Image: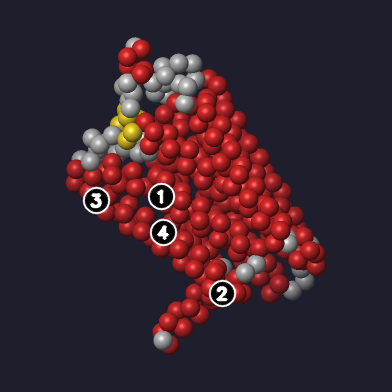
Amino acid sequence: MGDNITTITEFLLLGFPLGPKIQMLLFGLFSLFYILTLLGNGVILGLLSLDSRLHSPMYFFLSHLAIVDIAYACSTVPQMLVNLLNPAKPISFTGCLTQTFHYLTFAVTECLLLVMMSYDRYVAICHPLRYSAIMTWRVCIILAVTSWTTGVFLALIHLVLLLPLPFCRPQKINHFFCEIIAVIKLACADTHINENMVLAGAISVLVGPLSSIVVSYTCILCAILRIQSGEGQRKAFSTCSSHLCVVGLFYGTAIIMYVGPQYGNPKEQKKYLLLFHSLFNPMLNPLIYSLRNSEVKNSLKKLLGVERAL
């Protein structure tokens, strides 16, 4: 067993156990979704940088969310596409752990960014007269840096706990990328600490932040209901609806995977749920914000109008 432990240099991702024709079809579809993810989030970043009307704290956090979505997709989808083209092609041990680290970093960062965005909406609607005094650019930068730093820090903790584990079982990961629980299950040592840390981390960055978002939106709803003007209520709801859709998609799938019942038991449905989480969520986020946010839609129409005029 010692030789097996010291000679592990690569893993084989089982991915999608389907026929070659279906795999090629999935390759085409996932490639399209990947391009749409990069294009959609790239357009959001372009609009936020070019339109001075969108230079506000709300869209500052949205720009960071777009960056995270691009990085999130880039950390998992390319390997998935390679695996669809050549299922027998392994991923190196270093590459696998690097992918795990990146995935965890961007997932945690997105969790916290969504909390920052809900806080921004809370201040804007519940304390509108003090908004500019509370949500200064210094505060926004501190909140964004805190989100990124926490993401890197928590991912490093999991990586440090993962590195010493001996891997002496058949190195076949029952997933389409190096998801941390799937990797942990290949270790031939006691992994209770790793599994408990994953669960504790999931609770701390999912249940805790989601609870704060619920509290924020409860206060927001009460404040909106006190608005006398129907137009004022509609405008307030419109600024929050897109964020709520993104929160529901992201936290809903993540909590089912990592905090839901039968934790640690890699069911096929959870694997495919994570596919939705890592592939479709980053693609849908810019669509949700562009379709449900009037300011983003107006900015896009203005940009397209300028291009047509040219």
Crowd around label 1: few <14 · some 14–19 · many ≥20 (10 Å): some
Residue identified by numbered label 4: 38
- Which mark is first along the chain, 4 or 3? 3
**Circle number at residue 74:** 1
- Residue type indicated by callout 2: Asp
The residue located at (48%, 78%) in the rendering is 303
- Which mark is first along the chain, 1 or 2? 2
The residue located at (65%, 67%) in the rendering is 56
- Which mark is first along the chain, 3 or 2? 3
Residue identified by numbered label 3: 25
- Which mark is first along the chain, 4 or 1? 4
- Residue type indicated by callout 4: Leu
In the image, residue 202 sits, relative to residue 285, either above or below, namely: above
Helix, strand or loop at label 4? It is helix
Left or right: residue 290 versus residue 11 is right
> Contact (CB < 8 A) between labels 1 and 4?
no
- Residue type indicated by callout 1: Cys
In the image, residue 119 sits, relative to residue 80, either above or below, namely: below
The residue located at (57%, 28%) in the rendering is 197
Helix, strand or loop at label 1? It is helix
x then y, percent, for residue 73: 42, 50
The residue located at (22%, 48%) in the rendering is 24
Residue identified by numbered label 2: 51
x then y, percent, for residue 42: 45, 63
Along the viewing direction, whichever of 300 and 90 lies nearer the viewer: 90
Q: CA distance from mark 2 to mark 3?
A: 39 Å
Total numbered labels placed on residues in the image: 4
**Circle number at residue 277:** none
Residue sitting at the far bottom: 309
Crowd around label 2: few <14 · some 14–19 · many ≥20 (10 Å): some
Q: Nearer the viewer, mark 3 or mark 1?
A: 1
Left or right: residue 229 versus residue 147 is right
